[in-house]
Each structure stands twice: as C-alpha cells, then as structure tokens.
Amino acid sequence: MDAQRLKDLLEQVRAGAVTPEDAIERLRRLPFEDLGFATIDHHRAIRAGMPEVIFGQGKTAEEVAGIAASLLERAANVLATRTVEAAYRLLKEKHPEAEFFPRSGALRVWRDRAMKGKGRIVVVTAGTTDLPVAQEAFVTAEIMGNEVDLISDVGVAGIHRLIANLEKLHAARVIVAVAGMEASLATAVGGLVSCPVIGVPTSVGYGSHFHGLASLLSMLNSCASNVSVVNIDNGFGGGYVASLINRV
Amino acid sequence: MDAQRLKDLLEQVRAGAVTPEDAIERLRRLPFEDLGFATIDHHRAIRAGMPEVIFGQGKTAEEVAGIAASLLERAANVLATRTVEAAYRLLKEKHPEAEFFPRSGALRVWRDRAMKGKGRIVVVTAGTTDLPVAQEAFVTAEIMGNEVDLISDVGVAGIHRLIANLEKLHAARVIVAVAGMEASLATAVGGLVSCPVIGVPTSVGYGSHFHGLASLLSMLNSCASNVSVVNIDNGFGGGYVASLINRV
Amino acid sequence: MDAQRLKDLLEQVRAGAVTPEDAIERLRRLPFEDLGFATIDHHRAIRAGMPEVIFGQGKTAEEVAGIAASLLERAANVLATRTVEAAYRLLKEKHPEAEFFPRSGALRVWRDRAMKGKGRIVVVTAGTTDLPVAQEAFVTAEIMGNEVDLISDVGVAGIHRLIANLEKLHAARVIVAVAGMEASLATAVGGLVSCPVIGVPTSVGYGSHFHGLASLLSMLNSCASNVSVVNIDNGFGGGYVASLINRV
Amino acid sequence: MDAQRLKDLLEQVRAGAVTPEDAIERLRRLPFEDLGFATIDHHRAIRAGMPEVIFGQGKTAEEVAGIAASLLERAANVLATRTVEAAYRLLKEKHPEAEFFPRSGALRVWRDRAMKGKGRIVVVTAGTTDLPVAQEAFVTAEIMGNEVDLISDVGVAGIHRLIANLEKLHAARVIVAVAGMEASLATAVGGLVSCPVIGVPTSVGYGSHFHGLASLLSMLNSCASNVSVVNIDNGFGGGYVASLINRV
Amino acid sequence: MDAQRLKDLLEQVRAGAVTPEDAIERLRRLPFEDLGFATIDHHRAIRAGMPEVIFGQGKTAEEVAGIAASLLERAANVLATRTVEAAYRLLKEKHPEAEFFPRSGALRVWRDRAMKGKGRIVVVTAGTTDLPVAQEAFVTAEIMGNEVDLISDVGVAGIHRLIANLEKLHAARVIVAVAGMEASLATAVGGLVSCPVIGVPTSVGYGSHFHGLASLLSMLNSCASNVSVVNIDNGFGGGYVASLINRV
Amino acid sequence: MDAQRLKDLLEQVRAGAVTPEDAIERLRRLPFEDLGFATIDHHRAIRAGMPEVIFGQGKTAEEVAGIAASLLERAANVLATRTVEAAYRLLKEKHPEAEFFPRSGALRVWRDRAMKGKGRIVVVTAGTTDLPVAQEAFVTAEIMGNEVDLISDVGVAGIHRLIANLEKLHAARVIVAVAGMEASLATAVGGLVSCPVIGVPTSVGYGSHFHGLASLLSMLNSCASNVSVVNIDNGFGGGYVASLINRV
Amino acid sequence: MDAQRLKDLLEQVRAGAVTPEDAIERLRRLPFEDLGFATIDHHRAIRAGMPEVIFGQGKTAEEVAGIAASLLERAANVLATRTVEAAYRLLKEKHPEAEFFPRSGALRVWRDRAMKGKGRIVVVTAGTTDLPVAQEAFVTAEIMGNEVDLISDVGVAGIHRLIANLEKLHAARVIVAVAGMEASLATAVGGLVSCPVIGVPTSVGYGSHFHGLASLLSMLNSCASNVSVVNIDNGFGGGYVASLINRV
Amino acid sequence: MDAQRLKDLLEQVRAGAVTPEDAIERLRRLPFEDLGFATIDHHRAIRAGMPEVIFGQGKTAEEVAGIAASLLERAANVLATRTVEAAYRLLKEKHPEAEFFPRSGALRVWRDRAMKGKGRIVVVTAGTTDLPVAQEAFVTAEIMGNEVDLISDVGVAGIHRLIANLEKLHAARVIVAVAGMEASLATAVGGLVSCPVIGVPTSVGYGSHFHGLASLLSMLNSCASNVSVVNIDNGFGGGYVASLINRV
C-alpha cells in the first residue's frame, strides 16, 4: 500500500464513505512494510549519550578521519578503534581536542563528559602484553560516561598482587577482566567479587594457545558463575557491555 | 499506539479536525510494532502447496502423531522426519493413507499430489549406507510436488556406474547429491551436468571422517562451481532446496 | 604464627614491653596465612539473598535430596540443577513446598520470595527444543529474586514473531537469549534493544553444529555489541549473570 | 583399438566376412577409451552463453591478461576473478571495453549482454566489509546474463533496514546472501522469502571467527530451510549457482 | 544410441549403403555412454584373485551371511569385516570352512589359497589393545594371497623388543605398522627398514588422543620418508594396500 | 649369530686358530641383534621398587584379577587402574590384602610399603567431581612409596580455601594439580609454590569444555613456569611422574 | 667396554685363562652400546642407489649449495627440495650438470641414471596450481631411478580428461595422485586402476579448505581401498614411497 | 581496617581497656586484605638463586636491554628469551660479560655460577631444526645452576644414534626432550630411561603438523609414563621445570 492509497483511504474517512472502524480493519490487513514509514528504531532515544563508533580496522587513516569529522557535526562524542596515528593527526587539525591511545590504536573525541554510569567500572588485566586490549576497554567505558579504574599486571600466578587490589575490585559495580595465556584471572576475580564480570580473552600466548582459543575456552568454562564472555581481543565489546550494565 | 488511539485519530479525520495529510504524518511517526496488526508473513501465500513439516527428532511417537493429526485438519500434506514406526501406527488409525519410510524414519500423509515442479529432480547417492539420508531427500522432494528419480550406489571409485546413469542425470533440472566418505560424488556429478547440484554430506565414514566433517569440507571445496551444500545428514534440506529451485 | 604467639605479643603490648608501633611492625611481617583467621569471604555478606545451588549432574537423587535438606536448615532458598524427579519426591516428603521442573531437571525450594532485582528479566528462546535450557535460566532468575518473562519460539527465520514481542523486550532491564542452531536470535534481539543481552548457546542442532560450537561461535561473533556469552547449555549461568546485572 | 582397427572391422562387415551381430559383440568388448572419439562433454552445448572464467589468484597480471586475450578470440564474455589492476590495464589496450572492479579484483569483458535469467537475482550483504565478496557475486551473476540488484549494509542487528528492503527481496527469483561475523543475515533473509537463498560466508570477523568458520557454521545450521551454502569468501560460486538456478 | 541403432548402422555398412569411413564418423559423434556396452572396468581382470569384500559395519548378521553366501556362488574367497559371531554361525551351516576372528570381527571363507604376493608382509603392532585392527590387516593380507607375520606388543617405549624382531622386519617386502597412543612405532619401524611401511593409526588412547587424531597426525608427520598412511582403525585398508604392493 | 657360533669363534681363539684381532674384526661385523644377549634394559634395575601396573580399561574383571594374581607371584606390589569391583572381589579371595578404590576404579595390592620418596607429594583438586582422577594419582603415588596428602575442593573461584592450605602446599616436594572446568587451579598453585607442579587436566566440564580440551589448553598455557602437563584424566601419569621426581 | 677391554678378554681366552663359556657369560652381561661397533644400519646397503636428500626449507642458498657439494664428493646423486635459484647458481659453478626446477624449488644433480624401478610411475594432478607439489614428486621419483610420467590438469569435475588418460594410468605400476580442493582425484584414479595409489593432498584451496585439511581428510576417507596418504604438500614423500614400491 | 584503627586497638590493649583475648577476637574478624601488610610471597626466599627472566617477544631491543640493566643492579643473573642481537649489543656496552645465543635469541648475564642442581640435565633433540628451542632449554637450565648436556640430531627414525648416546641419557637426573614432526623422540627416550622426561613439542613440521599440534598430541599420548609436557616451542619452560626437579 503506497502513500497514495493510504491518503485515499483517509480521504474516504473524512468524506464519511468509510467509518473509522472499517478503516482500522483495512489497515489491520496491510503488511507493515508497505506503509513505508513505520520504523522500529525509536529505542534510539534510549541510546542517547552513546558515542558514535568507527571500527577502524581495514579503513585508511583518511577514511577514519573523514568519517569521524563528519560524525562530529552532529554527535558530541566519537570513538574510533584500531586505527593509526596518522588518522589522529588528520583529525586533530580540525578537532584539537582529539586524543590518541597508541597501544590500542583508539582515537577519541570526548566532548560531552557527563557521567552516565551509576558506579565504577574496573578494567583488570593480567599482563602488560594484554594492555592494548585493556586500554580499548578502558577508553570505551570512559567515553560512554563511566568512572573507570585500570588495574594491570595482576596474574593468578601471583595471587598476592590480585589480593592487594581487593578493595578496588570490591568497589566496582562491574568488572572487565582482560587476560591471555590460561586466562584464569577471570575466574580468580569472579571468585573474589559478587558483581558481574565481563571476560575478554586475548590472543596473547604461544603454541597451543591457538590465537586466543585457550583463553576463550578457559573463560567460558569458568567455575565462577558471574563471568560472561565476549570475543577474543574484543576490548571494545567488554567496555561496551560493562557500560550498559553500569547504566541500567 | 493502541487501537483506541488509532480510532481517535480516524474519528478526528472524519470530523475534519485532522487532515488526511496530517494523519499520514502522525501515522508515519508511529513505530509499527504498536499498531498490533501489521504483519510481514503475507508471503505465506507464496508458500501455498508446501507441506507442513514436523521435525521428529526428540519428539515422542505420541507427540508426532498428535501434531500431525492436528495439522491435517487444515493442511493437505504433512511430512514428519526422523520419527519412529510407532508414530506411523498411531497416525494410521485415523489417516490410513499415511506412509512410513523405515530407513529414514520419514512419515508422510500426501493427499494433494498436484505437481509443482517444472522438471525432474534426481537424488543420487554413492553407497547403500547413504540411503537413509537420500530417502529423506526423496520423500521431501516428492511431497513438495516433484517427479523424483533415485540413483543409488554410484561411487566415484566406480566411475562407469556413474556414467551409465548419465542420461538420467542430464534429464534432471536439479540434482541432490548425497554422499559420505570422501564425498567426491558431488564433484563428479557437478562436472557431468550443468544444472544446480545440492550436496548433502552424510556422517557415513570411519576414523578421520569425524562424523561428516570430511564429507562436508569435500563438498564445500568442490572444484565444480555448480555445487552448493546443506548441513551434514540434512536430507530434508537437500530435498527442500531442490524443490524450491524446481518451482522457481 | 599461631594464636598463642599472637596472644603473647598482645600480652607484651598490655605489659608495655612492646609498643603498639612495634607490634604493628611485627604483625606487618607476618604472612597472613599463618594468622589462621583472616578470611577474604566477607563479601559473602553481599551475597545475602542468594540461593544455595547444587549442581545435580553426576549426583544421585539421594545425594541431591540430602544436600538440599541439609542446606535448607540454614538457607531460605535452594536450587538444584539437572537432577531427576526422584530427588524431588525424596525432598518433598520433608519440604512439601519443593517444586520440580521436568524439562530442565531443576528442583527448587523457594521460601524467601523477596524481590531483589530492580527491573524485569526476559528469557527469550528460538525453539521449543531450547526450552530445557531456557527453563533453567528462568527458574534461576526467579529464585534469585527477579520478575521474569519467558518468550519462547521466536526465531529469526520468523522475524515477525520476534517483532510481535518487541514491547516485552523493550520492557526488560536485561535479556537472556537462549538459542541453538545458527543462534542468530541473540544478534536479532541485541539489535532491537539497548539493554545487556546474555547469550546462552545451546547444543540443539545437527551435523556441523558440533554439539553447540556453531551456536557459540555465532554468539561470540555477534555484530550486536551488547551481547556477552556464557557456556553452551549453561542456562543457570545465563540466569545468574542476568540476576547480578539486575540487582547492581 | 585405434581407428585403423575399427576401420578394418567395418571393412570386414562390408565385405560380409563379419556379420553385424559379431561386429557388435567385438565392439562390446572394447574398452571405450580406446575408441578415441567418444566424449562425454556434449553437455557443453548446454553451457552456451556461459562466460569463460579465469581464477586470477596466484597468476601474474601478464598471465591473466594473456589468457583473457586468448579466450576472447573465441568467447564473447570473459571474467577473471581476484586479479589486480595491472591485468586490467594490459587487457584494456586491446579490449577497451574491459571493466575492472577494484574491491573484488574482478576483471570483465562483457560483450554478449543477452539476458539468460528468467527473473531477478538479489545480492544482499550485511556490512561494507563484505562488499568485496558481494561484488564478486554481483559481477559474476551479471556476466552470466542476469538482472542483479545489490542491497548492502543490512544487518540483523538492524532488522528495520532489512525490512525496508522487503519489496526488493520479494521480487527476487533467487538471493545470494553474503555475510561475515555471525552471518545471521542468511537466516533472516531466508525467513523473509520463499525463494532459494545461496549463503556465502565471508572471512570478515575477529578472534573466534577463525577466518570464516563461524559464518560458515552459522549458515550451515540455519533454521531457514531454503538456505544452501558455498565456500567461505566464494562470491563467484554464489553468483554462479544463483545464475544456474535463475536459468533453469 | 541403442543396440538396434548400432545394428542398423552395421547392416547398412554390410549392404554398402554406408561406407566404413562414414560409419566411423557417425560412431565418432556418439557419446560413449549411449553405446550401452563400452565399459571401463576391463581392469577387473587384473583383480583376479582378489577376494570379495563385505563391509559388515551397520549390517545385520543375516545380511552379512546372506551376501557372503551369495558371493560364494561365483567367488572363491570372501571376507567380511567388522561383523559378529552370529553371522559366522549362520554362514558355517552352509560353508563349514568359514573362519571367524573374534577380536576384529572378521569372517572369512578362504578356499583359493594360491599365493599372489612376491614376498612376506609383516604386520607389527605396539600394544595388545591394537590387536583388533592388526588382526583385520593380517586376515586381509592372508586372504589376498600373502605370507604374513604378526609381531605384536613391540612399542617404542621398549625399543629393545622392537630390535629383537629386527630380523623379521628386515625380511619383509612391505610392513603394516598398527599403532595407537603416540603411534611412534611407525616412525621407529620406518627408520629400521628400507621397504614401504603402511601406517594404520588406531583410536586406542585417552583424553587428548581425540579418537585416533593424535596417532593419525603422528604418522602423517613421520620423519621416516617410507611411511604412508590409511584411515584410523582401517586395518582392512592397511592389509589391502600392502597386498597390492606385494604383488606389483 | 647364535650362541653356538660365538662359542665356536671363541674356541678357535683359544685354539690359536683365530687371533684376538681377527675375532674382534669378525665380531665387529655382526649386527648386534644377532648376538642374542646384549640388551638395553639393564636400567630395569633402577626401576626396583616400582609396582607392576595393569591398565584395566577394556579388560574384563577376570582378566584383571588373573593378571594381577600372576604378577603377584614375583612382584611385591601391583596396581590396576580403571577396573571394576568384580575384579577386586575375585582378587581378594586369594589376596585378602587387596584394596579397592571405587571412585577411580583403582585396585591395589600394596605389600612392600617401604618409602622411596624423599619428600611429600600433595595431590590438590578443585572440585569433588575431579576426585576420581585425583584418587588415581593419590593411589599411584602411595604405592610407589610416597607420603601423599590430598587437598580437595579448593578452587580458584574461592581463593581463600586455597590459601588456607598454603602450609600443606609449601610442605610438598612436588604437587599434582588435578582440575577440570577452566583448570586455573594449576596456575594458582604454581604461583604459590616453587616446587614442580604436574597438571592433570580432567574431562569434567560442560559444553565448550570439549571433553577436557579446555582444561588441557589452560594448563599448557599456564603463566606459572613450574607447571608441566600430562594427558586428560591421566591421574596415573600424574602420580607416576610426581613419584619419579620425588625419588630422584 | 672399549675395544681394548674386548681384546684383553680375547687374549685371556687365547691364553686359556678364561674359558669360552666364561667369555660368553661376560659378553652376555655387556650392554651392547658399550661394544662400540655393533650397528643396526647394515641395511644401509639395501639403500644403495638412493640419492642423498637435503630438505632445503629454512636453509640459506649457501648452506644448501655447500651441503650438496660436500655430499657429491661421495654420492652420485643429490636432491635438494624447496630451495631457491640462488642455491642452484652457486652449485652450478662447480657442478654444471645441476638442474633446477623453479615451480617446486627442487635442485638436482643426477649422475647415476641407472634405472632401479621395475615399472613406470605416474604422477597425476588435478590442476595447474598443484604442479609445484607434483613436480617435487616427479623429480624425486626420477632421481630414485624410475621412468615417470606426468599427467596434469585432469580433474574429477572433468572426468572425460581423466578417462582420456586411462591407458597411461593402466600402464603404471604405482601412481602418485596430487590434488588440492576436494581432492577427489585420488578416489577417481583409485577406482580406475588396481595398482597402489599414493595420495598427496595439497594446500591449494580457499576458505574452508583450512590449508590442506579438506584434501587430507578426503584422501584418508577415500572409498577406493588402494589409496594411502602422505602429508599435505609432501611431494617428496609421495615420490619416495612410490619409488620404494616400484623397486620392491 | 586501616593502620590507624589497628594502632588504636593496640593502644587500647596497652591501656588495659581491651584484653588480649578480645583483641584476638576483633582481629579474627578482620578481613586480611584490610591489614595492608600481610603478604604471601615469603616463599620468594625459596626462589633464591633463580635468575630474573625477561620474556623478550614483543619487546624492543631497547626495552630488553633497559630492563636487563635495571634488574642487574640487584640480581646476579638475568636471562632474556626470544630477543635480538641488538639488545645484546646494547647490554654489552655496560655488561661485557653478557652472552648472546643467536639460534634461540637468548641473552644472558650469568655472574653467579654456583651449581644448584643435584645431578645432570640432558637436553636431547631430534633434528637440527629443533635446535633453537633446545638451545633455549639449555641456556635456561645452565643459568639456573645446572650441569647440562646437549645431545642433538638423534631421531627415532635413526634409533642407533639414540642408542649410541644411551650412557649420557642414563647419567641424567632429568631429561628435556625437544622434538617436532611426529615427536616420537620423547617416547623413545622415556622408554630408555627411568628418570623424569620433560617433553617440549616444537612447531617444526609441515602440512598436517598444524604448527606443533601433532607434536604436542604425540607427547601427551606417549606410552612412556615418565613423560610430562610443556607448551609448544616452550624451551624456557622445559629448562625451568627440569631445573626445579633437579634441585628438589
């Protein structure tokens, strides 16, 4: 049913040729897709305050900078992941407030810094080699309006370091645990706290690690029931889910 | 927007308080899901002549027979896959025209035998051990309104048997190739004909066959470009896709 | 350092032979594990209101019923997963309020029904075959003090059924999406809402499904950023994580 | 048996030294391969109108251009896949009508533009990153004589965009669904239409995507029965099978 | 072209109505498959002396005994693999010379005991648990007309036992090495001899053996260049290939 | 060269018919395997005190009891793994000192209880479901002459329980860590001690645990450098290696 | 025991100070490895006529040329696999008879061209992309003293090309079948001949080919019983095993 | 409880306001982590004599040299693994005693050469291609204070070379077996000795070796019970575990 037919129907209603009841019946039989205007993204409103996100992998510096600049015309905050410094330098010319995070390749313009989260998010990581992924989670959580703490280099093979940070962990409303190797950090953290823990397995490992598979399986099989998992090296996903939890 | 609000709007149109143009604008902003009646399954009509299908695996004989009987009140044809003879005996009491195919566990009530397909479908299989899956494809293709030929026991390790059936293969409008082991039948058939070939890998094999993985990978990597593939042992899927192709 | 040594130290403090400053220094050098009383599970308090949980798999009906009865002496609520009806019958003799859920094998004594969750949890599932896992998630979320809705049989292959439930989905504070086969339900739901979605892949599938691997990979690779994942068939884990999110 | 021996036999028949019956017996015992002329590719005739295809991967620009030029002496249409722009520039010198598609690396000389397909083919893709594979499918389907539509960037995580294209999808006689990540597009499309859908999983994804495995398994396990699958990133295969279906 | 048409053609040759040259031309255009008699299995003759083989797995005792009895009407020797004692008892009623080998489930009627092999075959196995597969290889090699030695229980973890059998190994013209676990027997034997070694990996192992995968990969990666491999547990295949090598 | 020929040679040396130099030359050309007496298992002596071991899996109760009885005629200690109670009852008739361990199916006659180990072995396990494997390790280590402690039910998800056992762990000369699920126990223990830790992954887990693969990969990728690993569920291997380390 | 001690013993025998019986006893207690002369590689003699082989992968051009030159001082024939043209140029300075095969990177000095094989070896390959591996097999088989035929570009998707070469295939005493993609060539060839077939799977393929896994599994699961398999891309191994078979 | 509160408590004890018994009770209820001083790494003392280790992979030459120089201010011995010669040259300027091992990329400053091990460690390797990993094990074991022997190039395919080194093997207190390909060396060595063997699988292999998986599975499934395994290519881990065993 195109707009014309709908208009015709309404004209008939106005003219009294069709009763409202009959008009409803006729509308009821129309497949919605023919209406040409009914949309389902009204929940976009709920997303208010979310940054616009550019997945930088596979895009040139020029593309990333261009898209970012374009988005910034209508969005307060923009985050680009896995991009290169050249994109940052291009964007900075126009947006001097742009920030670049070399470890993770995150590029950020964070203008609306209103806090949305109700509590603190802690990003905890086992080794310095996991820092790029942890940083991506950190930067994501921040731009989504959260207070974020980063605890790095606390591995299960050195439990005392983990315990030394117990207070910070207990203060979290949600935790992102980033770990490669055998990834037991997620389980250890999960056992120490009672809040939700988002596990981000990383591809950091050797030999039978199989590019993150070992860490992924370890987290999925965690005997701590409060752990759920996102994809390997998906720091963005970890920070994003944590932010949603923190604002519900 | 509930029906009341829609009715109110239409009343206003009738009363002249709202112009049809304005009503359209207001409707345009409504999320369709609130209309409560717009549906997208009008293409169900296109599906006319399709049988109702019951996936029997994991259902008791009583459940299968009960669902089948219920469906038969409004549908001409019903197919149940992977069920047991007990379901057949139960159904036959009420529907003596029911057929049971012990190899595949297919149960069928085929009342509307109008032909829908424009050509012949050939189901070809390499070994007798693949017959259960081939039979499921055959029975499915038949009840969907096709003339179907079954060529069994033609393996690539005995090419002459395949060649002996070349005429039948060339007469097909679409072919379903069912094969386990190294599954080269799909490639060999694909190279002999120029019509579409649906490969159905089976779990028939030993040791490094890994429950059908070897056959599946073989078919996906076929050097015959006219082969597409459905899931392991999915005779129903093979017959179903072939039937759709034959009726387009 | 055993209790005696600690007492001696404190006696010396009382006697003025050791200053409090020195006592602190001595204590500081003691490894905590020798203190014999310092524990880290004070966060158990936070867990107040959590049910006691028995993983029933691999335990006999007698064992499950026995453990449950024992726990009920000090705990208000007890949940046993993956057990059998016999365990239920045994427990019911003493605890007539026990409930049994045959699909999932969940056994529950739910006496303290105070609500802990701040919003609604929705458990959504694609097919009836996924119901056992969905029920486990449902029962878990309920006993942890949540209002829970169950939407079953809404698959991506029939999007209109999903859309018909949009209102319920939007009303959720957190959603548990239970799906086997290609598990695209998690992605479809994730795209329709902006709250956290916990994906529970199930082992429901055939052939190349590889006992849940296909569903698991699908969910981990979801292009909806609000999806995190628990282990295959882990309905308990899905309900547990959702409950934690709902009470933070 | 060489031609001479056959001729000798026939001479004997002519001379009456051998009866036709005996000649048949003698011929009957001859292995066909010795006849030197019986061929099985008479179905080549059916292939009339098919383009000649060069798989460019692993071939130098010079090789691709050379083979293409040679084929063009006798063939109206030539398609080279996965080649480089240098091959295009070489070929264009002699064949200025050559076209190059940089995203997919497809090189095409399309002189005989007669339509062979009976309906429209739609190539639908979830994300811009899948465009190279989608373009390969598109270019292939076109040169095989089809009207082709390309719908890009409609993901299941944004169902409304898919629904907005419902009319185009319903107009298709066969659909090629190209998708990476969790590849639920194939299932969603399959559920919206009743024509055959060819799924082309792509290697677009991260971490546990395992270079396309996640997408492949998702499509093979689709709960939409009208989906069959070709190899990962095999845009050519998807376009080829769709073309065959459209001309049967 | 059916026989009648061929006969008509030859009649015309006899009658002088068609010249031999023209007849050749007409024959030349016929696809061989229409001739109805040209076959490619003339090499069956080479197979003289091969036993008829029945793959017993998945067949009932009655089926195996029935097929065997039927084959014995025209074949001297029949071998059935992986069958049960009941099949043996049924067959023995009619063929008292039947032999049954309980470990492997091989059933054999070996009437023509002429030796075809030019040298000795040695079947060597690492552990008693591999004996069922080794026995299948042994029985197969014997019925194909070979002198066969069986060396059992010589593992690489006890090299001296292997060395103690060096003379027997050196006397072999071809060796079948049957091994589970880490399957290093194939490599050790391969390094001690200079004849071809057929590796048969078995599914004997635990945990990370993955049903024979570990043994299979070990044999495929052997640093002894004279080792080739057949499928997991495929004792028949090992014995068969060894027999072919021994008779070339 | 049999003993006779060697004796003949030496007789000739005695008789002066062959010089020692020539005798050496003749011996030098003999392949050692013909000497019939040079053996390499003189290190068997080192193995003194080792029990005889029967791998019970796949053997009947009668076989296990028979072998055990036979071994006990010359060996002080016999251990049978993975057998059934019936074997125990049979053996006990003759050897009342036999012990049976129902969880693991270990059967033991331990007569020579001399201690061989230089320190204590600790077997530590995460959950009660891992007890069968832990018990196999325990029983093995004991019969090999070691003082063994068993610490059960200390998981990483409850670190305080692990820490509560720190003293016992520090007292160990070698530790066997038995763990299923995500198996982070091995890493946690490895980080707490400085002695060697033998990891025994178990097949205890669900879904993506893949029958022990998750635990195995976790242990192999442990960031604690003192962990080495044996096969999944291989409690015997863990106890055996630990015993060797404890006696070196 | 060094030679001196042995000589002393024999001197004592000669002197009558030790009886032959006692000498035997003393020898009997000596571990063979101390004898310093008993070797097990006397079967090296059997290897007469084998070329010396250098695995070039991972070695520099200088290393390969140097090793080759050194070996050529005592060996008639030398083969280096997977090396580069620079190695060839270096070696040619001193050995102008050196040959280089660019596709496969094989480098050969073939001076003793005596034939060792008893029949012909045929190397058959499906596509031009498999030629590097096929060439390695060809060059290996030649230098080991065999008449070798190469049949290239005969795929199962074009069976007539395979059949056109039937005569050559039937003339072979052993066949090496080199194939990537779905590798059904090995099965097709295996079904056409009755001699041993060595399958060499190649890593030629896309997407779900997984670097040769698809071809490997296909060959291992071949329904032609005369096929055994070597490692992926192992042309050398295929040629080597075929040569051994041809000379037994 | 911060230090102030603890001090207050002790002041009260001194003042007699709180009895030692009550103070103990209060302390008993304090979670240890609030004490701010209790640590668990007192076992560091046991680690005396261990070198400091830098994992060089992923670190720049400058970083490695810088960290090493810093560690050398307080540590006698420093080992950096998988680094480059540039790091060595930088470090040598300040520490001329630095050593670099180009095959493995190990960089070592070994000043305290006191022996800690009680016996000899033997590192044994099958092929020259495994030398990088073997060297890493060797260098690690040396700097941890052990006498180490390296036996290289003894493969199972040439057992006599292994046997020629039997004396050295028997002299070892612990053995590190480094092997790629089918890795049967670990099993062969394990069968020849009775001391613990640490298997280090390497990624040396082709095709179906899958980057070390074949070697890993082979070692895990070894039928020699004295073999335990570390990660693929983990020479450091092998040397480290061996050193721990040698010093217990």
Image: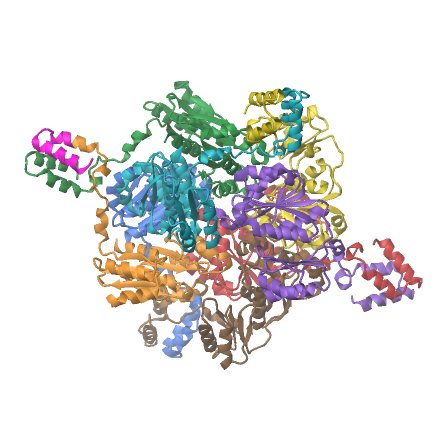
Chain colours: A cyan, B yellow, C green, D purple, E red, F blue, G brown, H orange
Q: Residue furthest left?
A: C16
Instruction: Point out the stretch of residues depicted in magenta.
Output: H1-23
Q: Main secondary structure of the magenta part?
A: helix
- Give the percent coordinates (x, y) of residue F64: 43, 43
- Give the percent coordinates (x, y) of residue E64: 65, 44
Is H125 located above or below residue C70 in the figure? below
In the rendered image, residue H22 lying in the magenta stretch gets the answer yes
- Give the percent coordinates (x, y) of residue F137: 35, 44
Q: Which image quarter holds the N terminus of chain F?
A: bottom left
Is H241 located above or below residue B201 in the figure? below
In the rendered image, residue C110 lying in the magenta stretch gets the answer no
Is A117 located above or below residue F198 in the figure? above
- Give the percent coordinates (x, y) of residue A235: 41, 45
- Among the 4 quarters of the image, the one containing residue E247: bottom right
Query: Residue at coordinates 22% horizontally, 54% vertically from top-left?
Result: H48
Closest to the observer, A246 or B153? A246
Q: Is residue B114 visible?
A: yes
Query: Residue at coordinates 7% horizontally, 31% vertically from top-left?
Result: H15
Query: Residue at coordinates 48% horizontally, 55% vertically from top-left?
Result: H210
- Among the 4 quarters of the image, the one containing residue D98: bottom right
